[in-house]
Image (spheres, rainbow, N blue to C red):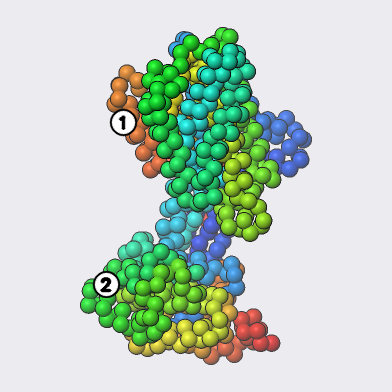
Amino acid sequence: MNTEQRRKERIDRGIKVRTDGLYAVMSWRELSYLTLPRIVLIVGLLILPFVMPSMYWQRVISIVCIYALLAVSFDLLAHFVGLVSLGGALFIGVGGYLSAIMNTSLGFPPLLAIPIATIAGAGICTLLLLPCLPLRGVYFAIVSLMYPLAMTRVIEALDILGGTDGIMGIDSFPNRWVEQYFVILMVLLFLFGVRRLVNLDIGLVLRAVKDNDQAVRASGMSITLYKAVAVFISSAMGCLGGACIVHIYMWSGMSLFALDFSIIPIAATVIGGAGTLVGPVLGCLILVPVSELLREFGTLRIVFYSLILVGFIVFRSEGIMVYGQRKYHQIERWVKV
Amino acid sequence: MLEATGLMVFYENMLALNNVSIKCEDKQIVGVFGANSAGKSTLMYTISGIMEDIRKKEDMAGGERITVLGQVRFLGRDITDLKPSKRAREGIVLCPERRRIFPECSVMENLRIGAYLATSSQAKDTLEYVFKVYPPLERLQKRVGGFLSGGEQQMLAVGRALMAQPKLLLMDEPLLGLSPRIQSMLVRSTKEIRDEKGISIIVTEQYARPVLPIVDYAFILENGAAVLEGPRDEVLDNPDVRSAYFGVS
């Protein structure tokens, strides 16, 4: 016989149970239990530009935020719609070039060019990806990976859009505070917006598409339409990031289509916790600075990077956020069976 | 032959199996009956070891915590901690619920995948035997598994399990969703397999009537607990069982 008839039990904390309903407003303690994690995230992101030691690191914050936008967009597509997207580079590139063209050719100021590039870029990306939306399986991943590869070659071969030199002389943000707070606020806006979205009716349909698209079709809904909406939203996030990045670097070139933009968000999602939306942002906050720190190792940093990733997948494939949420909401104890 | 004692399985805090002990003697057909959520599939997964696999996956992904307590002995050996693949090598082969055939492989390929553990002469003999017990399969050899009808898929699933040279065959709801005619054919063939091959069989089912005639010993599960057990005739005569699992009042 198994002598040790004990098992570890997980139960929700009392405060979690109490704050599930309307009773949450009964006391400050319970209110703070609910809001504290959110406040920590919001305030934490907002004070980041102040605590960074140098201009260089402030710039890193902007880049982190752009990756965070991409990571949230990946998480939305992969874990709420079931489309594994490798199109981060496509979104960044389309948004970036659009904003750059509008700024240099049409003379739009950055704060006008960015929103237009976001919407127009999302439209373009959605149209480009539309043919593979009715299909299930790896096709979406393949197609979204092929576009950025094709784009760089097209730009190079036809020597359009500045060719290999890229488009130069793009206006920057009015000053670096505007730049940083703009991207940080956008991350927060989209993060909480998407979190809201996936709990609305349309979010339910999207999750249903992920679970069983045939059942959704049988309910008389067009899965292509719903997938297109989701792709539009998440490519808007990516295009926004791309539009911001060209105004940060004041340059738009072929490296906007670099695969980093497709891969790092995925890595961040794995580390942060898939399907939590907050997790990917946390993942970016960890991964991007780490990769900056490892910059002095040159190309060897990819090795460290891969090691971190493999370590996470092998030992904690749930991700930081899932783990953290569980610890926050639940206690564990040994009970006799 | 197989003796499972004090099996308790928790999915997180939900008790799926509550102190269930079942045993299966040599060359016996043992029936396990119970409604949905009674714990039949959990019992099958626990005996075949797949529960261990599910537990590890859930653990890695941070999902539900599954706790398995109790002991499983097979042929006098404690196999509680054995991996499902090792258990299959020992001779415990599961024919899973909803068949789980490989839908994109042909019938022949499905059977050959099942024969992975067998030597080539064993595989050849068993293949002939499977075609003898389930004649329709011989005709359908080249058809893709996913396009077979439900009954044919079930025959294929049992055939595939037989190819693995089981000493103990676990059949999880083999009659699920089949017409009465196919059901009775499958039940007859199950008995045939036991008689000719000398394989012990544990079969689970919700509705006992079609299967009970061939079982030697029966267990009734209710809400995760074994509420009743006994030889066939004893169970057959029990008025509660008759009303609950036979539809006879």
Q: Is residue A13 above or below residue A167?
A: below
Q: Is residue A273 visible?
A: no
The answer to whether tags 2 and 1 share a subunit is: no
Residue A130: quadrant of the picture: top right
> Horizontal and vertical percent for residue A228?
59, 42
Between A170 and B72, the one nearer to me in the picture: A170
Check disc 2 and give the amino acid type. Answer: Ala
The residue at which mark 2 appears reads as B118
**To which chain does the residue with label 2 belong?**
B
Question: Which residue is at a point 48% across and 57% down the rendered structure image?
Answer: B67
- Mark 1 secondary-structure assignment: helix
Residue A235's place in the image compared with A138, above or below, is above
Residue found 30% across the figure and 79% down from its top: B126
The alpha-carbon separation of the residues under discs 2 and 1 comes to 43 Å
Give the percent coordinates (x, y) of residue A109. Answer: 60, 13
Which quadrant of the figure contains the N terminus of chain B?
bottom left
Return the mark for residue A303.
1
> Which class describes the residues within 10 Å of circle 1: few (<14), some (14-19), or many (20+)?
few
